[in-house]
Image (cartoon, rainbow, N blue to C red):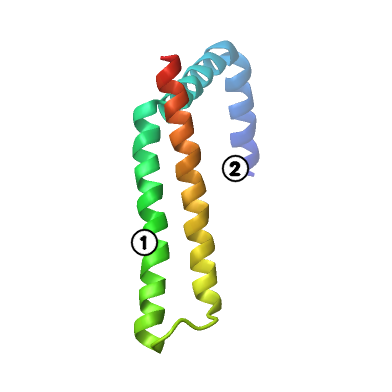
Amino acid sequence: MAGAVGAIVLALVYLRWRPRINHGVGSALKWVYKFVLDPKTCRVAETFCNEVAVLWFVFPLLDTIYEHGKIQDDPLLHQAFWVSALFFVFAITLSHIAGREEKEG
């Protein structure tokens, strides 16, 4: 019952102040979009993704070598390599976005 009343109140508030609410939401989304695609943000995210890719590649590999003495056909090792590759692709994409934004800006 309280949920229905809350939904009705929200609908009435939205209908009353729709232009201001839409403008505020649009402005906030535009700011977030500019912030996410800013070259500085992309470079920081690129560095983070590179570090994650290296850690997901190196530590499972070292753990497998030291624990078993040799690299076996370990499914967790293959999954770690896939995660590493995925973050590396993210880093490449972010570096291209940052490079393109620097040339345009």
Element type at mark 1: helix
Quick check: 82 left or right of 56? right
Q: How many C-alpha atoms fall within 10 Å of the one at disc 2: few (<14), some, or many (≥20)? A: few
| Secondary element at tag 2 | helix
Q: In this view, does 51 lie to the left or right of 26?
A: left
Residue 1 percent across, percent down from the top left: 64, 44
Q: Quadrant of the C terminus?
A: top left
Q: Residue at x 48, y 67 (%)?
A: 80
Exactly how many numbered labels are in the figure?
2
Q: What residue sits 51% from the left and 75% below the top?
A: 76
The circle drawn on residue 33 is none
Disc 1 versus disc 2: nearer the observer: 1
Pointer 1 and pointer 2: residues touching (CB < 8 Å)?
A: no
**CA distance for labels 1 and 2:** 49 Å
| Residue sitting nearer the eye, 24 or 65 | 65
**Can you say whether 54 is above or below 80 in the image?**
above
Type of residue at label 2?
Ala
Which of the pair 34/40 is nearer the observer?
40
Q: Where is residue 44 in the image (x, y as percent from the top left)?
A: 34, 38
Residue at (52, 21) in percent of width and height: 25
| Residue labelled with disc 2 | 2
Rendered position, 90 above or below 54: above
Label 1 neighbourhood size at 10 Å, few (<14), some (14-19), many (20+)?
Answer: some
Whichever of callouts 1 and 2 sits on the residue coming sooner in the sequence is 2
Give left or right: position of 65 versus 30. Answer: left
Amino acid of disc 1:
Leu
Check the image and name the residue furthest to the front: 70
Q: Mark 1 points at which residue?
A: 55
Front residue (pair 103, 86): 103
The percent position of residue 10, horizontal first and vertical second, equals: 59, 28
Of 14 and 95, the residue lying toward us = 95
